[in-house]
Structure formats: C-alpha cells, structure tokens
Amino acid sequence: SKGIKKTEAVVDVGANTTSLLVLHDLQTVYTRDQSFGGRQLTEEIMRQFGLSYEEAGKAKKFGQLPDSYESEVLPSFMADMGQQIDRSLQFFFAASSKHGNIDQLILAGGCAHIPGVDAMLQERLGIPTVIARPFAAMSVSAKARPSVLAKDEASMLIAAGLAFRAFDAEP
C-alpha cells in the first residue's frame, strides 16, 4: 500500500509559511514551519517591475510579466525555495535518529504550481518529487472546470484533507 514502510515529506509552500510534515508508515513523525512563501516572490515582482502588491499577485497568477521574470526573478526565488526546503529537511535529519532518508517529497501550496518546480527540487534535493493532487482519485462535479481545478489543485491539499477528516468523524 502507498506510504507503508516509506518516509514521505509533504512540503506546503503557502503565501507566508512553508510547512514540512514528515510521515513514516503514514504516521506524522516530524513537523516544522518556516516563514518563507510565495509572498517573497510577489514582493520581488513588485520591486522589479514597479507594481502594487495586488498587481504583482495578478500578474504572477496570470503569467503577465516581462521576459526577465522567467530568466531572473523566478529562478532566484526557486533557488531560495529549494534552500529553505533543504534546510527544513536537514533539521529533520538532525532531530531523527531513525530516519536517514526521504523516499518521496510531495509538494503542495500555491508555489507548487510554478512550472518545473518539482523537477528543480528533485534535482537539488536528490529526492523523487511530485506535486500534490488531492483530487486525482475523486470524481469531480461537471460544474468544475478541469483546467481551473488542475491549476489550483495543489493549493487545496489541506482543505481536501480536512474535508476527508470530517467524513471520518463519528456522527
């Protein structure tokens, strides 16, 4: 079964916080939060291109930025993100005598939608990396537009998990 006898890291990179959750045999063995997130990228876009926070956020979401964004701003942010995640994992390895490796890294949160971020992290960390797809095994309403859902799916991992937990609760 998935996750059994494995050590997996779930990294949720939100706007302000990056959360690391390490699971072994599907049980939480370590958690750590850091103040790093997509807000840093939005603020760098503001600085580079003279935009307000709202304008920078919209431009980031809809890909309406000059070429220098993809050649300079984004790679620098992705490198910082890799460094932050690497640091969190080093804290985990230092704190855990039982777990010397991570079998898989699952990336969630808004920053998981950056094209190529999974490949970059896999190369940097040497850990197989996938983007969280909480709806992969679910049937989705015909009213939900697949392209929109796919774009935001990794951001919804925690919400989907909380919804599942509500179904598991006793009536």
Image (cartoon, rainbow, N blue to C red):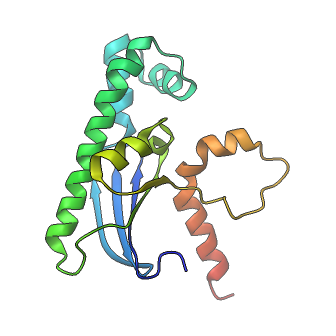
Nearest to the observer: residue 155 or residue 50:
155
Looking at the picture, how far across and down is residue 142, in whole percent?
Answer: 85, 50
Residue located 54% across and 58% down the image: 157
Looking at the picture, how far across and down is residue 2, in whole percent?
Answer: 53, 75
Residue located 45% across and 22% down the image: 56
Q: Quadrant of the C terminus?
A: bottom right
Q: Is residue 57 left or right of residue 29?
A: right
Nearest to the observer: residue 25 or residue 119:
119
Q: Quadrant of residue 94?
A: bottom left
Residue located 64% across and 88% down the image: 170
Q: Is residue 37 above or below residue 128?
A: above
Nearest to the observer: residue 107 or residue 50:
107
Outermost right residue: 142
Residue located 77% across and 42% down the image: 145
Q: Is residue 161 left or right of residue 116?
A: right
Looking at the picture, how far across and down is residue 128, in whole percent?
Answer: 40, 57
Q: Quadrant of the N terminus?
A: bottom right
Marks counted in the figure total 0
Q: Quadrant of residue 7?
A: bottom left
Looking at the picture, how far across and down is residue 57, in whole percent?
Answer: 48, 27
Q: Is residue 39 left or right of residue 171?
A: left
Outermost left residue: 94
Q: Is residue 126 above or below residue 82?
A: below
Question: Is residue 35 among the parts visible in the rendering?
Answer: no
Question: Is residue 159 among the parts visible in the rendering?
Answer: yes
